[in-house]
Image: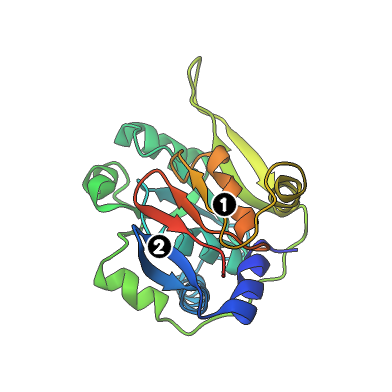
């Protein structure tokens, strides 16, 4: 079981349909998204990461967020998304506590994080380095167990240090299926608006859009759509 399989299936059957949108414009179709995910996953492994290694995502909502997230799973890695409103020192603590091996940071956060984590490789989406990574030789979807950790979600740390909650591929797959069964019955061209930042658990309701039809948009003018 690997969450990246949702995207692989959609790309295979609906490759020319919009997957990521900015406003009303298609940013990536499913075939391109899957190709970038496989390439970025390959680039991460080429940098020496191995199955289960943690990848920190310190990003405000960004059209490449989903590419990075699914690339982690494509390569068998674990995503560690953090709140973009945290102070760089707080992000630095989470990076160290989670033993993250590489950081993806949006341009608005990159300088502060680079100062706090000078020894960790840092990649900024939208740069030439990032584009080259997505163009890397693609890899096939990693073989992962249902209990392998896909996501480490850190608590706010209101009464102490933030703590990482471990979510497996099975956890998130079950959530996606339950969402479709009990919450929204999505069919084209139904739209689902997701208000929270992409790193939040509530925004995980975008995952069901991999196995079933219906477009999705998040709070910023960036969203993920289902094939029509």
113 or 120, nearer to the observer: 113
Marks 1 and 2: CB-CB under 8 Å?
no
- Mark 1 Cα shell of 10 Å, populated few (<14), some (14-19), many (≥20): many
**The disc label shown at residue 21, or none:** 2
Residue at 77%, 60% in the rendered image? 145
- Mark 2 Cα shell of 10 Å, populated few (<14), some (14-19), many (≥20): many
Residue 201 placed where, x, y %?
Answer: 57, 39
13 or 9, nearer to the observer: 13
191 or 76, nearer to the observer: 191
Residue at 42%, 35% in the rendered image? 93
Q: Secondary structure at mark 1?
A: helix
**The disc label shown at residue 142, or none:** none
Q: Is residue 97 above or below residue 35?
A: above
Q: Secondary structure at mark 2?
A: strand
Q: Which quadrant would residue 142 be assigned to in this image?
A: bottom right
Task: State the residue position of label 1.
Answer: 206
Q: Which quadrant would residue 209 be assigned to in this image?
A: bottom right
Colouring chosen for the image of the structure = rainbow
Left or right side of 93 for 70 = right
Q: Is residue 183 above or below residue 48?
A: above
Residue 66 placed where, x, y %?
Answer: 47, 59
Single out the residue that lies furthest toward the bottom. 137
Left or right side of 94 for 120 = left
């Amino acid at each position: 079981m690997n969450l990246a399989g949702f995207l692989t299936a959609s790309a295979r059957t609906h490759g020319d349909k919009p997957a990521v949108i900015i406003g009303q414009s298609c940013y990536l179709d499913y075939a391109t998204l899957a190709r970038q995910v496989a390439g970025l996953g390959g680039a991460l492994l080429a940098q020496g990461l191995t199955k289960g290694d943690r990848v920190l995502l310190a990003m405000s909502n960004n059209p490449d967020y989903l590419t990075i997230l699914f690339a982690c799973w494509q390569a068998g890695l674990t995503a560690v998304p953090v709140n973009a409103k945290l102070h760089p020192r707080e992000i630095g603590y989470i990076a160290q506590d989670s033993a993250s091996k590489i950081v993806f940071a949006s341009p608005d956060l990159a300088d502060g994080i680079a100062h706090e984590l000078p020894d960790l490789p840092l990649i900024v989406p939208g740069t030439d380095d990032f584009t080259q990574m997505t163009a890397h030789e693609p890899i096939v979807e990693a073989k992962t167990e249902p209990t392998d950790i896909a996501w480490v979600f850190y608590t706010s740390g209101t009464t102490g240090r933030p703590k990482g909650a471990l979510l497996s591929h099975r956890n998130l797959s079950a959530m996606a299926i339950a969402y479709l069964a009990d919450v929204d019955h999505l069919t084209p061209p139904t739209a689902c608006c997701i208000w929270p930042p992409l790193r939040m658990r509530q925004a995980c309701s975008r995952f069901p859009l991999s196995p079933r039809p219906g477009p999705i948009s998040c709070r910023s003018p960036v969203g993920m759509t289902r094939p029509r």
